[in-house]
Amino acid sequence: GQQLNQSPQSMFIQEGEDVSMNCTSSSIFNTWLWYKQDPGEGPVLLIALYKAGELTSNGRLTAQFGITRKDSFLNISASIPSDVGIYFCAGQLSAGNNRKLIWGLGTSLAVNP
Amino acid sequence: DVKVTQSSRYLVKRTGEKVFLECVQDMDHENMFWYRQDPGLGLRLIYFSYDVKMKEKGDIPEGYSVSREKKERFSLILESASTNQTSMYLCASRGLDSSLRGSPLHFGNGTRLTVT
């Protein structure tokens, strides 16, 4: 199946640093979603984006829906140890209730206290 | 809050066994999904269901079947388990969305299946 190009694949940072990750696609999406998966848990939705150019924040997290509708970015400011986990982007291709999500392979984040 | 419950966190089965993975959601969601998650491969869709008794193949349906007899329950069935089906299995649900927006998926905590 189709997948998104998510980068970087993994990051190891110091506590307090800012983090950036992104997803790109050859297809246009009308929805971008960012999820986080804690170790041993299922993914949890962080931010949903519905409009090209949209910039949305959730605490220290900020995500943007790229203007071309083919990419999205997630930034985490002032990282803390509990930010550790795998971050997934997902894009949705079409409208309607039978729409299918296309997933990135994830960015694994490790934070050194 | 939406709750998606997977009946087992860990399962160990033998090759050739028939395996049932159960998932229940409590938000009256129409759509339910089964994914498997493997290192380096991300989330891959096995099957999904739009409504009771309806099912559709995802990207990797081979070796799996599903059952949706009741709206709240979606079962994944491995007819004859094989070692390459050792994986983390994630169930998710999603409600219908009257707008054109994508209604987000809500995931369970996963079942880690080991086939020996």
Image (cartoon, coloured by chain):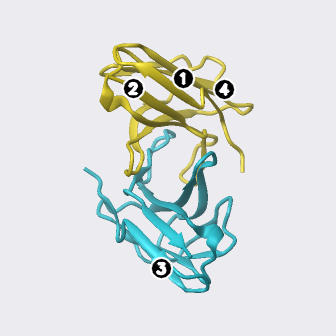
In the rendered structure, the residue with mark 1 lies on which chain?
A: A
- The secondary element bearing badge 4 is classed as loop
Q: Residues within 10 Å of mark 1 (few under 14, many from 20)?
A: many
Query: Chain B's colour?
Result: cyan
Q: Residue B55 lies in what quarter of the image? A: bottom right
Residue at 63%, 33% in the rendered image: A29
- Tag 3 subunit: B
Picture layout, residue A113 above or below residue B64: above
Dot label at residue A111: 2
Frontmost residue, B45 versus B85: B85
Label 1's element? strand
The label nearer to you, 4 versus 3, is: 3
Q: Position of residue B110 (x, y in %)?
A: 42, 59
Label 3 Cα neighbours within 10 Å, binned few <14 / some 14-19 / many ≥20: some
Residue at image mark 3:
B20
Residue at 56 percent of width and 86 percent of height? B17
Instruction: Provide the letter of the chain coloured yellow.
Output: A
What residue did someone put label 4 on?
Answer: A70
Question: Disc 1 residue type?
Answer: Met
Residue A24 x %, y %: 66, 27
Kindly report which numbered mark, 2 or 1, lies closer to the viewer in this rendering.
2
- Residue beneath label 1, please? A21
Query: What is the residue that sits farthest to the right in this orientation?
Result: A26
| Residue plotted at (68% across, 62% down) | B60
Q: Measure the alpha-carbon separation of dots 4 and 3.
A: 38 Å
Which structural element holds mark 2? strand
